[in-house]
Image: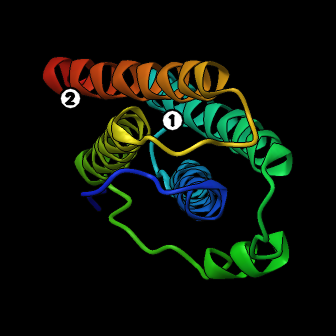
Amino acid sequence: MSIQQSVSGDHQLARLLQIGVVLEEVVEARAGEHAKSLETTDPDVEALLDEAAAESAAHRERLEGVIDQLDADTIPFEEIKGLVAQQYEAEADFDGVLYDQLCNEETAYKFYDDLIGAVEDSDAEFSIDRGELLDTLEAIREDEADGVEQVTELMETGA
């Protein structure tokens, strides 16, 4: 997903942040499914998946907090949750799990990087402080970059 234009106001920002919520729901759900489906118990992989799920839940809560501050109509959370409630099927072998996790982390990183750029390029006035919004998004993006690095290291070492 790529955001190719600046953010025009609260309504569009709320929709984009809700996409972030969905991304975080997907990462959390997939990490949980992978943790349950692993046939081997590699402590490094288990720790990575647990951390990814917890981090995604924290990111989702932060994004929801920002959305609540906006002066915009939003899609009810139960509808968003329904978008990701389906079973996630993925390879349950070591490489498949790590590859999937890497894709999830990279997708989230790219989304937040694009969103930050779109907010920075925007001349719109938001009902929340632009600096605080950018600080939140940049912190989440940094977490995603750290996640990419952790997964890559595990893949390189063959944990």
Separation (CA) of disc 2 from disc 1: 16 Å
Nearest the eye: 43 or 49: 49
Nearest the eye: 129 or 116: 129
| Res. 41 mark | 1
Give the position of the N terminus as an image quadrant: bottom left
Name above or below for residue 139 compared with residue 118: above
Expressed as whole percent of the image width and height from the top left, the position of residue 27 reads: 52, 52
Q: Nearer the viewer, mark 2 or mark 1?
A: 2
Task: Classify 10 Å Cα crowding around label 1: few (below 14), some (14-19), many (20 and above).
Answer: few
Task: Classify 10 Å Cα crowding around label 2: few (below 14), some (14-19), many (20 and above).
Answer: some
What residue type is disc 2 on? Met
Name above or below for residue 50 compared with residue 30: above
| Res. 155 mark | 2
Expressed as whole percent of the image width and height from the top left, the position of residue 120 reads: 39, 32
What residue type is disc 1 on? Thr
Expressed as whole percent of the image width and height from the top left, the position of residue 155 reads: 20, 29
Secondary structure beneath dot 1 equals loop
Residue in the image at 61% along x and 42% along y: 125
Nearest the eye: 15 or 28: 15
Q: Is residue 95 left or right of residue 74?
A: left
Residue in the image at 82% along x and 40% along y: 65
Residue in the image at 35% along x and 23% along y: 145
Give the position of the C terminus as an image quadrant: top left
Secondary structure beneath dot 2 equals helix
- Whether tag 2 and tag 1 are in contact, CB under 8 A, the answer is no
What colour scheme has been applied to the protein in the rendered image?
rainbow
Name above or below for residue 46 compared with residue 79: above
